[in-house]
Image (cartoon, grey):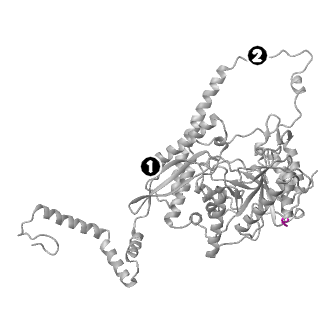
């Protein structure tokens, strides 16, 4: 007969099966005791007896859930998805082991965001396909192995692993490009014919006289500095980083914006001012005007997001009414084109004054005073307008202006339209002297902004430009969540977060990123298109949630980088010469 401890008496013959059973019982007892299972069961039973919950098993589940091991990343998966322009891009999926079960916790994608991948043509199409294929290989292969076992709530640790991986790929890509360039150079040198003999100088002419006689008097412009090529597959890094951030928010059971704010070690919530695109013109429009890609609404501070959208919709409807009529009040013919990629009506026009007059007229019809109830920002996109063969900007089709002449044009526009409070990318980054001159002539009446939306944080940023008060930024390609946090900490009052025309469909997390990062402004585009309105709706939901919780901090003045003088005299703008 067995003793109370489960061991057989020495005088009793025990079969091998019984001995194995007793040994297994002892191992089980040791296992449970080592993991404090009997103690925890006793604790929860005692607590539950006094609590007497209605849902007994729910109480037990909640108790033991708190004791479960923290989730860990078990693997990644990558999928091809279509963006808002019908182009293929990459979506990263994060799987985590949660209470011994593998679950899909999040998925995310980022725009390609670089003209290197957005241009059309067979060669560029092959390059984009290679970009997508390489990104999927990274996600399913090395990145999945590197992140296996990582804590999805440790965004810094995950992004450091992603950064180290990308740095190695970036170095390999540079070596490959350098080797290919050397081979191409050698092939070109071999194919070149021998140089002709030097010409015999004419009698009586001094050396160099012939060369200088036909020299152009035009001032030479600085050559274009091409951006550093993006590493194929780099968008996998940004997609995985964002997907991990969403997984961390899910596991912590908080919205993504609160998770991002916690990563920044901040506690104050401010909803960014939404910048709404009212009109699109520019080079892609059917009209002759190339200069103004977007006319953007800067709303009066202190308004809720719903109020801003309601006002923007009224302006939009009035703009469409005027554009569909034969002429405006100013007697200028107006014509509406199709909706642009930015989600705003396209104006077919020949001069920038037509677009601004149209907005001023629409606001006047609604009783809105430009410069008081609203201000305007102009996305000039001038870096795409340079005719390098002539060294001038093609502001209007067939009409060229030198960099200095373009500065004079901006000066005249701002004098005529004091409601314009910001110019985005008014010049090429290489025209440093003109940036400085433009900054000096406009004074504090207008903010100059540099458009960095085509570059990811993995690419070297251009040198700082004189007079620039802020930068427009997107999360593209290899830009990680930690990169955005770092940029915000380094430039707390100088970042406008912008959406892209080619974002993956269904992604509305840009609004969460904007609130969590604490940016003062977010540019979401116009009010047409489901993928844009999803972001506006998410921004409204966040604002309502914060207001209900009593944690919403309202703005009473326009924050930097768009805080300007109240009127043209206070701003100190200089008269055009």
| Image vertical order of residue 431 relative to residue 357, above or below | above
For the point 90% across and 26% down, which residue is it? 213
Neighbours of disc 2 within 10 Å: few (<14), some (14-19), many (20+): few
Q: Quadrant of residue 405?
A: top right
The earlier-in-sequence mark between 2 and 1 is: 1
Q: Residue furthest right?
A: 577
Left or right: 124, with 337 as reference point: left
Position of 548 relative to 292 (above/below) = below
Mark 1 element type: helix
The verdict on residue 396 being magenta is no
Q: What distance separates the C-alpha of mark 2 from that of mark 1? A: 60 Å
Q: Which residues are magenta?
A: 366-370
| Residue behind mark 1 | 145
Name the residue rendered at 63%, 63% in the picture. 538
Quarter of the image for the N terminus: give it.
bottom left
Q: Is residue 370 visible?
A: no
Q: Which picture quadrant has residue 490? A: bottom right
Q: Position of residue 304 (x, y in %)?
A: 71, 69
Whole-percent x and y of residue 71?
A: 44, 61
Task: State the residue lying farthest toward the bottom.
Answer: 50
Query: What predominant SS class does the magenta segment belong to?
Result: loop
Q: Which residue is mark 2?
A: 196
Residue 408 screen position, x and y as percent: 88, 48
């Amino acid at each position: 007969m067995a003793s109370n401890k489960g061991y057989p008496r020495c005088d009793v013959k025990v079969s091998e099966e019984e001995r194995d059973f007793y040994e297994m019982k002892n191992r089980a007892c040791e296992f449970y005791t080592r993991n404090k299972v009997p103690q925890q069961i006793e604790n929860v039973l005692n607590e539950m007896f006094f609590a007497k919950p209605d849902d007994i098993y729910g109480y037990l589940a909640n108790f033991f859930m708190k004791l479960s091991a923290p989730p860990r990343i078990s693997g990644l998966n990558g999928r091809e998805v279509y963006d808002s322009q019908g182009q293929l891009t990459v979506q990263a999926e994060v799987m985590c082991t949660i209470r011994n079960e593998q679950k899909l916790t999040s998925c995310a994608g980022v725009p390609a965001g670089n003209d290197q991948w957005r241009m059309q043509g067979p060669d560029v199409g092959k390059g984009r396909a290679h970009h997508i294929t390489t990104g999927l290989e990274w996600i399913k292969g090395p990145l999945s192995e590197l992140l296996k076992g990582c804590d999805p709530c440790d965004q810094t640790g995950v992004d450091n692993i992603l950064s180290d991986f990308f740095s190695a790929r970036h170095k390999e890509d540079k070596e490959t490009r350098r080797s290919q360039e050397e081979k191409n150079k050698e092939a070109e040198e071999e194919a070149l014919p021998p140089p002709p003999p030097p010409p015999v100088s004419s009698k009586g002419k001094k050396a160099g006289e012939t060369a200088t006689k036909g020299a152009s008097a035009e001032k030479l412009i600085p050559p274009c500095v091409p951006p550093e090529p993006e590493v194929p597959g780099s968008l996998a890094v940004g997609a995985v980083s964002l997907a991990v951030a969403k997984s961390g928010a899910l596991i912590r059971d908080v919205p993504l914006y609160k998770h991002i704010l916690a990563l920044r070690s901040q506690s104050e919530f401010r909803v960014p001012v939404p910048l709404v695109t009212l009109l699109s013109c520019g080079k892609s429009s059917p009209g002759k005007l190339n200069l103004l890609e977007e006319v953007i609404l800067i709303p009066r501070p202190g308004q809720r997001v719903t109020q801003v959208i309601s006002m923007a919709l009224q302006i939009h409807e009035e703009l469409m009414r005027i554009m569909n009529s034969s002429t405006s009040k100013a007697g200028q013919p107006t014509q509406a084109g199709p909706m642009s990629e930015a989600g705003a009506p396209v104006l077919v026009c020949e001069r920038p004054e037509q677009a601004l007059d149209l907005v001023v007229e629409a606001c006047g019809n609604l009783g809105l005073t430009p410069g008081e109830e609203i201000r305007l920002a102009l996305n000039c996109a001038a870096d795409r307008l340079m005719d390098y063969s002539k060294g001038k900007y093609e502001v209007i089709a067939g009409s060229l202006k030198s960099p200095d002449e373009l500065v004079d044009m901006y000066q005249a526009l701002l004098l005529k339209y004091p409601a314009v409070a910001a110019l985005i990318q008014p010049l090429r980054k290489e025209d440093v002297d003109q940036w400085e001159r433009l900054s000096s002539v406009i004074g504090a009446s207008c903010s100059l902004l540099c458009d960095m939306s085509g570059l990811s944080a993995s690419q070297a940023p251009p040198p700082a430009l004189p007079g620039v008060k802020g930068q427009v930024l997107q999360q593209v390609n290899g830009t990680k969540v930690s990169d955005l946090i770092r940029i915000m900490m380094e430039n707390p009052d100088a970042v406008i977060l912008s959406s892209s025309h080619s974002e993956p469909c269904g992604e509305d997390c840009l609004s969460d990123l904007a609130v969590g990062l604490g940016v003062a402004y977010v540019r979401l585009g116009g009010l047409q298109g489901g993928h844009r309105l999803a972001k506006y709706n998410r921004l409204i939901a966040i604002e309502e949630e914060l207001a209900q919780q009593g944690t919403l901090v309202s703005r009473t003045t326009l924050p930097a980088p768009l805080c300007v003088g109240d009127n043209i005299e206070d701003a100190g703008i200089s008269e055009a010469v």
